[in-house]
Image (cartoon, rainbow, N blue to C red):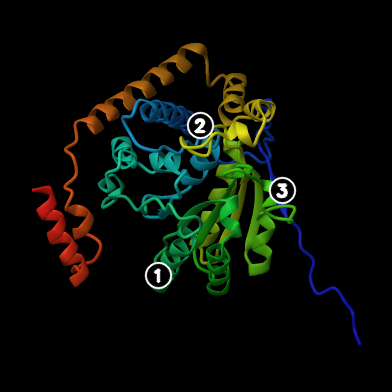
Amino acid sequence: MVKKVIEKFEVEYLQVLDENGKVDEKLMPDLSKKQIKELYELMILMRTFDDKAFSLQRQGRIGTYIQFKGQEASQLGTAYALTDKDWMFPMYRSGGALIVRKHPMHMLLQYDGGDMWGLRTEKINNFPIAIPVGTQTPHAVGCAWASKLKNEKVVSLVYTGEGGTSRGDFHDALNFAGVNKVPCVIVVENNQYAISVPRKKQTAAETFAQKAIAYGIKGIQVDGNDIFAVYKAAKEAVDYARKGNGPTLIENVTYRLGDHSTSDDAKKYRSDKEVQEWMKKGPIIRFEKYMRANKLLDDKYKKEVAKKAKEKVEKEIKIYENLKNPDVEDMMKYTYEEMTDNLKEQFEELKNNIQ
């Protein structure tokens, strides 16, 4: 009889930019000063949109809204690593990533206002937002498999929360992705809470990144509030997938600063002290410290960026609020290519009731 160690594993953690704004130059990704400024401007635009959308919900001008406040670096760094030809699969908290991926902000508000046409992406390779937890992961893996079968150099990137890793969809997707070496990047945004369930009650594993090990794929844990570390990990994963080497799971350790949604009250399950501690580690604060230290940011430039972002958002709000109301019949017409007999019956009843 033999007892032996077949394999040993380890999980790598990556941080480039610390909370004081200092970087490890040896780990810095290849980014020009122009690109660093572009990242900063996008981050401020994301935060400005998020804060304004929250206010719009409170004013009754859009429906339920799900903030991504605090997770800007996680979404910006990953989305920025993609090309326009790549596919992105968002979850319900991926509004920031969609902005980076050139989805018009007025269309995001259109969706938040209850109009499904706000998610039309005919000219952008973004899938519609997935509301069910975890279902977008197999969608992304399937799309990546199609790209491989067609011999395309196209990568699929999908976002899920740490709560999504407890769903069967997630594990089915990773298993299929590993076996078939599909060009996919799975981003787990570990924001510490699956609604009210804390991370420690979500899994006994030390990291979410190590879940990749069971499926034979690469996994890495990243400081999700560090824009440089997130971009570096994502760029390497995207390049790795594009070369035909298979998928990577990236765990971005970050924090949801807002409530789970505008229907939630996070004070019932977490303390203000905890939130304040995470605010000090926020992606914008540390990014600005770095930029000031490297003479890429001063008060004048900061005000200009904030003003420009506010003007962009206000312009998009005006476009949204001048859109025509959707056709009520649309909810029946576009479920299937041809309506079933049951849908036809409902459709006729609907038309009679709205005339």
Q: Tell whether label 1 touches label 3 (CB within 8 Å).
A: no
Q: Residues within 10 Å of mark 1 (few under 14, many from 20)?
A: some
User: Which residue is the site of mark 3?
Assistant: 200
Disc 3 from disc 2: Cα separation: 35 Å
Disc 2 from disc 1: Cα separation: 34 Å
Residue 109 lies, in percent from the top left, at 32, 36
Q: Amino acid at mark 2?
A: Ile
Upstream in sequence: badge 3 or badge 2: 2
Compared with 298, 221 (above or below) is below
User: Which residue is the site of mark 2?
Assistant: 36
Instruction: Specify whether 333 is left or right of 282.
Output: left
Q: Residue at x 19, y 53 (%)?
A: 330
Disc 3 versus disc 1: nearer the observer: 3
Q: Secondary structure at mark 3?
A: helix
Instruction: Specify whether 143 is left or right of 348.
Output: right
Q: Secondary structure at mark 1?
A: helix
Upstream in sequence: badge 2 or badge 1: 2
Disc 2 versus disc 1: nearer the observer: 1
Q: Residues within 10 Å of mark 3 (few under 14, many from 20)?
A: few
Disc 3 from disc 1: Cα separation: 36 Å
